[in-house]
Image (cartoon, grey):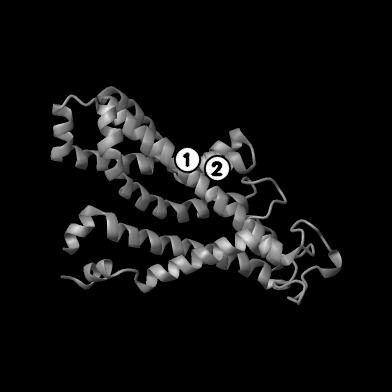
Amino acid sequence: MPASSVRADRGPVPQTLLAIALLAAAGALAAFGPLLSGLDPLTQNVARANADPSVAHWLGNDHLGRDIFTRLAVGTRLTMVVALASTAGAILLGAVLGLVCVAAGRTFEFLAFGAFDLVRAMPSILLAMTLLVALGPGVPPVTLAIAIAFAPVFAHVARAAWARETTSGYVAAAATMGSPPLVTLARHVAPNVAGAVVTQAAIVMPRAITTESVLSFFGIGVTPGTPTWGRMIADSVKHAEAAPTAVLAPVLALALTTLAFALLGDRLRLRWDPLRKGSNA
């Protein structure tokens, strides 16, 4: 048996523990960071513009004298909330709606996945930008735009899982017993599809985080002044020499968090993807 299969059966591997530790650190920073600093992320103090780290300001101050640590903590909270909410929205719009349309019949499937393919044809960031032009800035519009952009990914994953499950004997047995397709979906197929959807969610999360950061970097995401990782990078990149921590802090947060989700997604895929399991058996 290959070593990768043995590791999957023996419990967490170092990469998984690293991912959990990084995500726990991000969660702790988002939850308790503003309380620990006791400072307002929007308060400006020109006298401390580009100041070095100190006891009162652990990561120093940016070009407007705002506390970098507090802004990083609040930005982590907003970025994670948008990423989680948009991924959940993508699951509802993609996996749930896609499965219902597939179970409802070929006509509904054709119409739904025709729309999904149209959305999928456009790059996610470009589509999100286009939607935000119509929706306007703010956390809810950004969340909705990212959810729509990634919904087709979950729709196609769910349809592939549905196709795999419907070849199983229990689905045929349910149909023989007179179970309606939607009932079969809810009672029998959905629980077995959940693993593939959760695995895909862990893969989409870093992409959602990156998309939100790019939108904020270009100034079309959240409202101006709201601290997010992308907004912090955009505001501080011109002052990188005077206040390097103002740029390095959000860049490292973005890189480490996306790395953590990537490692976690790979672990979940190794554990729950039946095709990969079969190849490792």
Q: Mark 2 = which residue?
A: 143
Q: Earlier in the sequence, mark 2 or mark 1?
A: 1
Residue for point 61% across, 46% down: 221
Determine if residue 100 is in view: yes
Q: What amino acid is found at the position of numbered circle 1 in the picture?
A: Gly
Q: Position of residue 187 (x, y in %)?
A: 28, 35
* Quarter of the figure with the N terminus: bottom left
Point out residue 177 in the picture as x, y percentages from the top left corner: 15, 27
Instruction: State which quadrant residue 65 falls in.
Output: bottom right
Q: Is residue 121 visible?
A: no
The answer to whether 36 appears left or right of 79 in the picture is right
Mark-to-mark CA distance, 2 and 1: 8 Å
The residue closer to the viewer here, 146 or 162, is: 162
Residue 226, image x and y in percent? Answer: 69, 51
Give the total of numbered labels: 2
- Secondary structure under tag 2 reads helix
Taking 245 as reference, is 219 above or below it? above
Residue found at x 73% / y 66%? 37
Q: Residues within 10 Å of mark 1 (few under 14, many from 20)?
A: many
Q: Is residue 79 above or below residue 106?
A: below
Element under label 1? helix
Position above or below: 203 against 108: below
In which quadrant is the C terminus drawn?
bottom left
Name the foreground residue: 110 vs 261: 261
Q: Is residue 168 left or right of residue 208?
A: left
Residue that label 1 marks: 89
Query: Residue 6 location, x and y as percent?
Result: 22, 70
Q: Quadrant of residue 150?
A: top left
Q: Identify the residue shown where x is 48% and y is 69%.
A: 21
Q: Is there a contact, CB below 8 Å, between mark 2 and mark 1?
A: yes
